[in-house]
Image (spheres, rainbow, N blue to C red):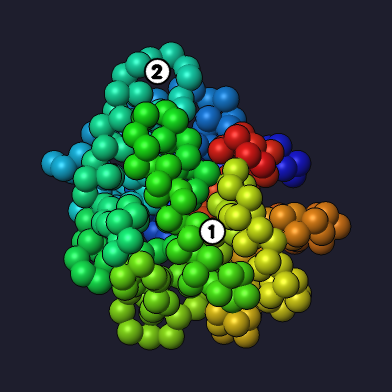
Amino acid sequence: MSPMNHPEAFLSTYVTSDGRVLRHDQGDDIVSEGQAYGMLIAELAGRDDVVRSIWSWTHAHLATPDGLLSYHADSQGKVLDAQPASDADVLASYALLRYDGPGAASLHRDGRTLAAAVLEHETVTDSSGRPVLTAGPWATSDPAVVDPSYLMPGVFEELARLTGDDRWRAMAASSVDLVDQVTQHGHQLPPDWARLQGDRLVPTGTGGGSGTPQYGPDAQRVPLWFAAACDARARSLAAAWWTVLQQQTRSSATALSLGGDVIDGSGSTVALLAAQASARAAGDDAGATALQRGAVQTDEGNPTYYGGAWLALADGLHDGRVTGCG
């Protein structure tokens, strides 16, 4: 399948006519992340009607009293976990604010409301006075819990422009600083999870708890976001990780140690796309092309909601349609 068809393939496979994004490989459940991905992917596909239907269903079934989105629901919309996830809230607000089809004024209002709720309920200030996005409202107590893959400098910059609120721009800068610090200036891979201590991130196990830190399905989004950022420092970090990821056993692995040792060597579409983004940032176009081919083949052999979503999003990140900086 041509890469240009990935958005339509995702919409036709995972999105229902009433706007639910179903994770078929995980029991047809629904997560707010998937609803946000669906809106962005529908925009990439030029499907304004799908953007509106996804948001209508999401707002009706997942909206919380504080203006955020419940994270998890069953296939019919019964909420299973009302705790929000900040990446979904950020990306949903961004999709709403960048929407330019019929009924845009209403969606833009909702986007501003959601973006303001993120700043109010899902951010903290580090010891240097910088705003930092936490993993959700549950993660704001000291020490705050951060999922580095939720730190999306290009999206934050665009939210600053679309909302007129410079806190988003400050958060874009702090995000690059924190990822630079936690990865030792790109010499190590970013962790799935971390705790904020002072003005530094400390890698942790899942959810900020005990356990061995790893570069896994969450952290693999960091090279994708950073390679597509307008900030040259972010793109340099994405390029630096290619030194670690360029070995074949590493580039496709579902999980690595922060130093690059293989923890789970099973093939992962998103791992390959992350390595592809890093290779492109480093100027290895041939390597990037091979990794893209591998990602498509991996998803064809084992289709997943997550892999399909990122095949569509990676195309838009690379060519500048998602953040304006490919």
Amino acid type indicated by mark 2: Ala
Query: Hey, which residue is sitting farthest right in the picture?
Result: 286
Q: Residue at x 26, y 52 (%)?
A: 122
Q: Residue at x 47, y 17 (%)?
A: 101
**Residue occupied by mark 2:** 104
- Tell whether 262 sits left or right of 155: right
Q: Residue at x 25, y 63 (%)?
A: 139
Q: Secondary structure at mark 1?
A: helix
Residue 169 % position (x, y): 43, 42
Q: Could you tell me if residue 130 is visible in this image? A: yes
**Residue occupied by mark 1:** 221
For the N terminus, the quadrant is top right
| Crowd class of label 1 (few under 14; some 14 to 19; many from 20; radius 10 Å) | many
Mark 1 in CB contact with mark 2 (< 8 angstroms)? no
Residue 112's place in the image compared with 106, above or below, is below
Residue 118 % position (x, y): 28, 45
Amino acid type indicated by mark 1: Arg
Q: What's the CA distance linking mark 1 and mark 2?
A: 29 Å
Residue 52 % position (x, y): 39, 25
Q: Secondary structure at mark 2?
A: helix
Query: Hey, which residue is sitting farthest front in the picture?
Result: 128
